[in-house]
Amino acid sequence: MIHVRRELIAGLEGPAPDPAAVRASLQSAIKLEHATIPLYLYALYSLDEAKNGEICAIIESVVVEEMLHMTLAANTLNALGGSPVIDGPGFLPTYPGPLPGGVQAELTATLAPFSIDKQLPTFLTIEEPEHPVDYPKLEAGADLTIGQFYAAIAAAIAKLGDGAFVDPPRNQVGPDLMRESVVVIDVATATQAIQTIVDQGEGTSTSPLEVVGNGYAHYYRYMQIKEGHVLEPTGHGPAPQDEYAYDGPAIPFDSTGVYPAPTNPGPYPPGSAQAVANDNFNYAYTSLLGVLHALFNGAATSAQMDTAIGLMMSLKGQAKAMMSGVPNPAVTIGPTFEYQATNPANGS
Amino acid sequence: MSYLNGLRLHFAGKFQANVSTVNNDPGHFDTSAFQASYQTMQGPKMNPPNGWFNPEGDATFRMLGCAITTAWTPDGAVTDDPVLGCSVADSDRTVPAKMVDLDPEQQLVSEIWGLEIRIADSEGNTLMRADFLPTGFIDIWDRGGDSAGGGDNNAGATYQSVLHNVQWDDVSHSPFLTELRQTAQATGRLSIKFNVDAINMHFGSPDFMCGRVVGTIGPYLPGEPLHLVLGRQFVATADPNVAASFFAPAGSINHFPAAVDPVAGLIYLDLGNALLCVEPGSGPADVGDLTLAVYNPFATPPSPAGSLVPLGVIPASGFRGYVSNTGWYAETAGIVVLPLSPAQLQLVQSSPLVLTGNAGVVISEALNGCFVRADTFVYRMSPGDHTDIDVYATQFGAPLAGVALSFTLDSSQLQTNTFTPPYIMASPPVATPADALRFGPTATTDANGKATLSVDAGDPGAARVFPGGESSIDGQVYGIRPAFADAILNAEPINQWNFVSFLLWSGYDAPAKPTWTDVQPILQQYANLYPSMLRFLNLADYDSIKANAELMTLAFSLDVSDPNSMPVTRDLSPAKRKMILAWLQDPLPGAVPVPSRTDGAEPPVPPPGAGPPAAAKGGKAAAAARRLILQSK
């Protein structure tokens, strides 16, 4: 389980939350949801899909939902009159480092190839749920779990009331563009959006199942990799822990199916093959952030979404080539996921 | 005037053209003969050839670090304008553009699709963005100074097009860009021309599949062709003594255009793809001071009629020398402007221009000044399609009105091969059946010197089926060469690259309910030829396609001008595309016949002691060496 610093919810507590503070918290949420994506993608693309297909599918399914969570947070922010900021250098976290707003000592997110002993535990830590029944009382000054962070936002939005929502609805990325998205227009839909984020990330207190969607919460998806088996219902009960067990089909890990991509990639020597490929990647990643920024700021069209998907596919192709030693098998390269609006990067 | 305008900017940097090379061998389109090794990197000196030098290429085309080196207005060089800190960049909001061959049997007009061009400041902020109208390269030649036919690395070629859908940001802080914007307002378009050379083919190099690009952007004015300078045309003669990979001009200078501005009293010469380099990617080789002159048709005592009247000199040395100034090429893109006096203007109107340097260095216009060329010169057509192609005739740069043009089927520059290393089999014939491409054999130019080449596509049928009949290269390629109907106007030399290339797709009747049996053979061919697709899915596998049906539908539905359009090669016929899209809506399974291996599918083994094949010099060199015109010699 990870915690975020309490300052992320500054101004949200008390009977009359500051709308600007709620918007700031939602921007923090967008940053936080995004920050796991490079981490997961780096591990995903380090895997040879032919040898570790099941693991790839699990990680990819989580990434897709992290993107949905970004969208849900952006919809909520837009509904409250804010404007998500995606396309600036400050949006991307620095790796290695804490997640945005995260507690420094708790977790250092490092771009690294997939591994059972290092990266998977990191992913599990990030996604580890906190059961509401176990919620400690929110102590003044204490760090927050992710669940508490979202609970504070939801509570503040409820206090703001429906009157705080922009009418007519504004800049919404709906389910027509992204499956399971929620058009946010009032407290009820905002609550639904936030609950989707929490449930998909953590599950509920009584079940690993997501309320929305057709899979397990992220923690349990990753646990399947650790346990080496699909999580399946047992038909037993009634205690929640008896209802499911990791005894479904095997999820094998083939350690020969991991490309020798670097841990903590970069910086690469200017002019090197690594720098050229990495610059191409980062330029495309920065382009994707720009496209998403536009998508979340009024250009919510299917063409814009298609462009984003195209860039995602291009990034996948580039990353897999880089990590698998294409064109030069002697050189494997890890993308650094840095903001880069020129190609090559200034200074390289 | 096009980019040859007093108002223009020059840029210089690198391009990347990460093309796949598995499709360089037409035999690789034979799915029944295809082997897994054809998807792997070639061996040393192409032994074995495998998938040639970049089998994992993904066709991306990028502009890298293209700094704006100089900018010009009619008043001269701009010295203090923010545009000088800017760059010409590609898109920051789409996937990279794609470089695409027309066909494995016409690989010498590779087009750039889906390229967004930007003028951006040093932080990457966009000041102007626009779409590059796709076009193929032309005038490829042995530029790099390797007289032994150095291949792709030694090659240079040029792209000329227009930028459309132009969007300007606030450029009020740049007087230059403000003026460019205002001047281009009449058409809303810009003219762009760039030269590419010195591509690197070493997979271990940071510059792998990158080369040099140097170019020019200027206004595009009403009535101008899109891909052609309506101006003076210097045409080179081939040097019969040089073993050129592409083209070696006898007078050392390659074909180039020029334009006279009679109002300003100037002539613009575009030497950007015309001067030899010392070595690939270097500055120009020293061929002496270049003197522009005009043939004086009149006897002017003591000079007899036909003597040369010098108009100006392009010095090799000195402050502005094209050799001594190491920044000359990057700063000028090879464009030289010389003043012409009223008397000289008068003279050049009706007499051929000639450019000379050291002994033997010479190039001129045709003596009669006549020139004819199609504007757009790469076409893809389906049976039943009709297209009208603008063809321009000029004489000494002026429109040639009311002349008859002739159009002739000319497949001499298309490419086939026999069953010799590194090719895995003989390639199918080109340009047959001849009657599938129907066109008016003559046309007369209008007052603007423009005539229409009217083309109707018939059905070439299964013109390129491989032995065994299990697979084919879809459609057929053809060439049409424009000329003057009156033979006396067709002055030598003729630029061999001056013709129009066509890919005619085969007719296809889609089944009402397509199944995997219909789809698989098409996708299997793509799966074979583009191993980079395996990073996303296995195109030849039913389950893989079905699982990705949504993404496939998206990519196959995009307009071909979209950089993300699939297949990136733009060689799938609309009829088959429609069938695949219909199938993706209802992906019915179907049996797939196990391919029977045809005999002779094993790569031929070179005889002992044989050197590397010509194809080891690169894909373009290989294609150029396979041209029909060379096989008939």
Image: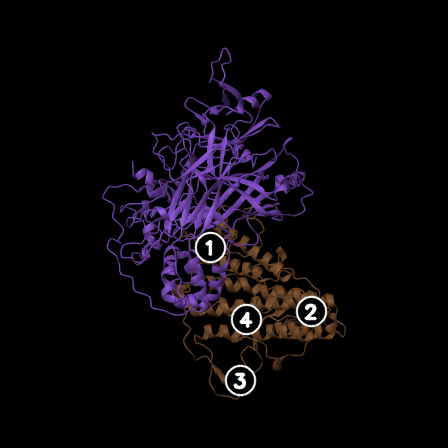
Q: Can residue B104 be seen in this view?
A: no
Q: In this view, does B285 lie above or below A159?
A: above
Q: Mark 4 highlights which residue? A: A125
Query: Which SS class for mark 3?
Result: helix
Instruction: Specify the amino acid type for callout 2.
Output: Ile
Q: In which quarter of the image is the N terminus of chain B?
A: top right
Label 1 marks which chain's residue?
A: A
Same chain check for tags 2 and 3? yes
Query: Closer to the N terminus: mark 2 or mark 3?
Result: 2
Q: Tell me the colour scheme of the image.
A: by chain
Which-is-in-front pick, marks 3 and 4?
A: 3
As helix, strand or loop, the secondary structure at mark 2 comes to helix
Asked whether the residues under the numbered discs 3 and 4 touch, taking CB atoms below 8 Å apart as contact, a structural biologist would say no
Q: Name the residue under label 3.
A: A240
Instruction: Report in which chain the residue with disc 2 lies.
Output: A
First in sequence: mark 1 vs mark 4: 4
**Pointer 2 and pointer 1 on the same chain:** yes
Q: Do labels 3 and 4 share a chain?
A: yes
| Residue B458 image point, x, y percent | 39, 51
- Marks 3 and 1 sit apart, C-alpha to C-alpha, by 44 Å
Q: What residue type is labelled 3?
A: Pro
Q: Find numbered disc 4 in the image and state the secondary structure of the residue it sits on.
A: helix
Graded by Cα atoms within 10 Å as few (under 14), some (14 to 19) or many (20 or more), the crowding at tag 2 reads many
Chain A on-screen colour? brown
**Mark pair 2, 4: CA separation:** 22 Å
Residue occupied by mark 1: A333
